[in-house]
Amino acid sequence: MIDPSGWNLPALGRAWREAQPFPHVVIDQVLLAADLARVRESFAWEPHAHLRGELYSQMRSAQPPSQPLVQTFCDGLTGPSVRAAVELLSGKRIARGDGNGYVYREGQYLLPHSDHRESEGRAVAFAFYLAAPERGGELELFDCRTRRGEIISTRSARRIRPRANRLVLFDVGARTLHAVREVTRGARMSIAGWYYGR
C-alpha cells in the first residue's frame, strides 16, 4: 500500500538537513487516491478514547490500531521498506517503529513539547494525515534558544498544514519543540508515532 521506492531520497535528505528550525521533511501524495479512501473509511470505525492532560486534549486509538486495514497501513508505515527510506534520508539508524490513530476535534490541541525520551530511543517522529480540518490543526515547529543546555526562549518558526495524504517526518531531540494548534473547525485525523534507534 505504501511504497517509498518512488521517493527522491537524495532530495529528501537535502531538505531534511537544510530544514529550519530543525530537521524535517514533508512528503505529499504518499498513497494512491483509492488506497487513501479505503484507509480513511476503515479509520472511521477505529475506536478512539478522549484523553485530556496538562499538554493536550485529543482522541487516541489503541496501539496497535484495532481495525485491520488501519493496522495494515500502520504496519506498512513502520515496516522495513519505509524504515530503510527514513534511515537514508535522516542519516539516523532506525530499528523499529510504532504508531496510533489520532483525532483532534474542534477545541482540541497539543501544546509545545519535545518527544525526546532518552530511555525510549525515539529518533524520528512521523504524522500521516488522513483528513484535514477546515481550520486549525497545523503542526507548529519552534526555534529554541538555549543557555547551558536549557531552553531559555522559543519562537514559532514554521506551521505545516495537515493536508490529507501528507506525511511529515521530523527529528526527535531535546530542542525539537513542536505543537498541534487548536482545531477551530472540522477534524484532524492522522496516524502518528515514532521510529526508534533501538
Image (spheres, rainbow, N blue to C red):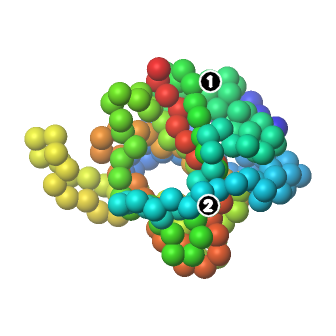
Residue 10 visible to the viewer: no
Of callouts 2 and 1, which one flags the residue occurring earlier in the amino acid sequence?
1
Residue drawn 55% across the image and 42% down it: 193
Image-quadrant location for residue 77 = top right
The amino acid type, in three-letter code, at marker 1 is Ala
Where does residue 177 sit, x and y in percent of width and height? 35, 51
Callout 2 touching callout 1 (CB < 8 Å): no
Residue drawn 41% across the image and 27% down it: 121
Q: Quadrant of the N terminus?
A: top right
Q: Nearer the viewer, residue 174 or 106?
A: 106
Q: Looking at this rendering, what residue extends furthest in the left direction?
A: 148
Residue drawn 26% across the image and 53% down it: 144
Q: Residues within 10 Å of mark 1 (few under 14, many from 20)?
A: some
For numbered disc 2, what is the local secondary structure? strand
The amino acid type, in three-letter code, at marker 2 is Val
Where does residue 113 sit, x and y in percent of width and height? 35, 53
What is the C-alpha distance between the residues marked 2 and 1? 28 Å
Q: Which residue is mark 1?
A: 84
Q: Which residue is mark 2?
A: 103
Image-quadrant location for residue 86 = top right
Vertical relation: 145 (above or below) 124: below
